[in-house]
Every structure is written in C-alpha cells, then in structure tokens.
Amino acid sequence: MKGEHDMNNDDDDAFDEFGVLKPGRSLRVPKFLMDSMQRSVTTARDADAFDITKHRPGFRVVMTDELAQAAARRREGYEASVRASEERWKAPQRIEQDRETACDAARVEVVSMDDARRIRQESYLAMCRRMQDAWRTTT
C-alpha cells in the first residue's frame, strides 16, 4: 500500500481537507502524550492482545450460571452411573446383606462380659465347622 511505510510522506498527506485521517492511513501517538482515557483503552487492548491463556491449545467456553448448573448435573449423573455400575454385579440378596451388615455395624449394644465370651465361642466354633466342611463343597 502506498505511503504505509514511506518515510518521505508528509504528515499533511495523511489527512483530507477536513482534517480527517484518510482511508488506509494511521496515526501513531506515543503513550506519554495520551490522556488517561486513551491510556486505559490501549492498556486494556494490550492486555487482551497478549493474554497467554488465549494462545493455549483447546477450546474456550464462557461459563454462565446455566452452564455451571448443567456441568454440576452432568457430574452428578456421572457419579450416579459409576455407583450403579459398582453395585450392578451384586445380586439383590448380597445388596440386602450389605445393608444389614452396615446397620449392624452402626448399632451400638452394651454386652456383658459373659455374653461377649459366649458370642466369641460361638463364632469360633462356626468358623471351625466351616473349615471342616470346606473341602466337601465343589465349585
């Protein structure tokens, strides 16, 4: 373009008869000659132009309240599907047994020392019977 970088162009050639900058011409003003409004505009433009996050790979998303709520619902749905897939392999009897075990573990009972010894002895004997009969079962 003629006159874009031509050092011999006179500044008067850049303006028309009304003092308006001609099309295709530019006027550069040093920052120290600008007023505060012009400085704030150029500073904001410079910050936007050189924002490093805009140069990283990937897409950009403007996060509104609706999008944030949708992301939260999507995350909750994903977590629910993970929980369902973790429980899917269990038979209904096993799920009920797990619930009962959790309830039993949460229940706190006061047991006398004699009852504790009896429960311990019964549990030990039940374990011994299971071990004695374990070889008899076929898989």
Image (cartoon, rainbow, N blue to C red):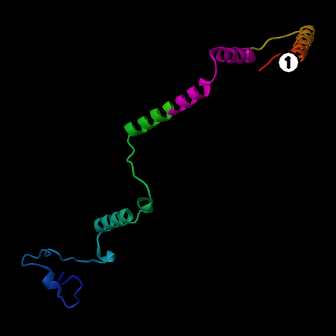
Indicate whether residue 84 is drawn in magenta: yes
Identify residue for label 1.
Answer: 134
The count of marks equals 1
Instruction: Please identify the residue farthest to the front as the structure is shown.
Output: 138
Along the line of sight, the residue nearer the viewer: 61 or 29: 61
What predominant SS class does the magenta segment belong to?
helix
**Dot 1 amino acid type:** Ala
Which residue occupies 13% across, 84% down?
A: 13
Give the residues drawn in magenta, as a range: 78-106
Q: Looking at the rendering, which quadrant does residue 135 occupy?
A: top right
Identify which residue is drawn at 35% across, 63% down: 44
Q: Is residue 128 above or below residue 16?
A: above
Residue at the image point whose x is 64% and y is 21% from the top: 90
Q: Quadrant of residue 48?
A: bottom left
Which secondary structure, mark 1?
helix
Q: Is residue 104 magenta?
A: yes
Q: 3 or 57: nearer the eye?
A: 57
- 126 relative position to 10: left or right: right
**Image quadrant occupied by the N terminus:** bottom left
Left or right, 131 with reference to 102? right
Badge 1 local density, few (<14 within 10 Å), some, or many (20+)? Answer: few
Query: Is 125 placed left or right of 34 in the picture?
Result: right
Residue lying at 53% horizontally and 29% vertically, measured from the top left: 81
> Which quarter of the rendering shows the C terminus?
top right
- Residue 131 percent coordinates (x, y): 88, 18
User: Can you give x and y, in whole percent of width and height, for residue 118 in the image?
Assistant: 91, 9
Residue 89 rendering spot, x and y as whole percentages = 62, 24
The correct choice, above or below, for 59 with respect to 80 in the image is below
